[in-house]
Amino acid sequence: MLARLWHSLRVEDALLFGWLVLVLPLISSLGSGDRFASLAPEDDALVGLAYLVAAAGALVALATRSLGESRFDFESPNSPRSYALMPFMAALTLVASIGAENTGIASAEAVFAPVAAVTVVCHLFYNKLPTLSPNTRRVLMAPCVLVCAGIFNGTMADVFDSVDIGDLFDAVGGDPGGLFGVFALLVLFSLPFYAMFVFAPRQITESEGTWPAWAARYGVFLVGAIVGVGWLAAIGS
């Protein structure tokens, strides 16, 4: 069982783990505090450029396809691919809007319509899109996933800063069931962000993996995020 779950992990999972645990806290400590970790860093052209580059790579991945894959339609509840397109559009809109606003190209509100239009066109004319290998599309999408992971970490750091997790643990009196409940709430809170920022972009580039495989990947990501958020909180204190 454990061996099967281990084999479900991919290079992106290890890259994300290192990014969350080591790179993001290092950037925060060397930079102006939270340059890449903040949900919406303001008036920073360098950050804006990084977000735009990430969005451009994701857009190329969206506007291409891998041989043998069909359009992103709802296939079945058991197909992870069925749930990817709309969360990805939300993630791409967020990344592109932060980039456009920080570089002064456009306002965040002006980004939604173009991203939505491109997503719809790519969906409707999927079979006409140019083809690229899955590995190439994974490389193109990787900067977007890393940037999104930074947004996730910044969001969770803000949550942990406003909510005293220690007080929550004290409130349940050390009861194992209560402790599990607190942890479950944290997991449930973070799960939609993972679906939008990591799961959906990776499904766009290569539709693969079962639900148990994605559960294992999410577990690795969550451990990295918790450690990374701890570092960010320590740096910011």
Image: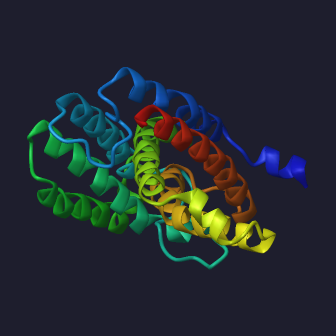
Q: Is residue 136 visible?
A: no
Q: Nearer the viewer, residue 215 or 132?
A: 215
Q: Is residue 225 visible?
A: yes
Query: Could you tell me residue 164's position as x and y percent?
Result: 51, 58
Q: Residue placed farthest to the top in the image?
A: 30
**Number of numbered discs visible in the structure rendering:** 0
In this picture, is 46 found above or below 111?
above
In this picture, is 207 found above or below 95?
below
Residue 176 sits in which quadrant?
A: bottom right
Query: Could you tell me residue 187's position as x and y percent?
Result: 61, 63
Q: Nearer the viewer, residue 40 or 207?
A: 40
Residue 150 sits in which quadrant?
A: top left
Residue at 16 percent of width and 55 percent of height:
108
Residue at 25 percent of width and 42 percent of height:
41
Q: Nearer the viewer, residue 30 or 76?
A: 30
In this picture, is 95 found above or below 77?
above
Placement of the C terminus among the 4 image quadrants: top left
Query: Could you tell me residue 24's position as x and y percent?
Result: 46, 32
Residue at 42 percent of width and 65 percent of height:
87
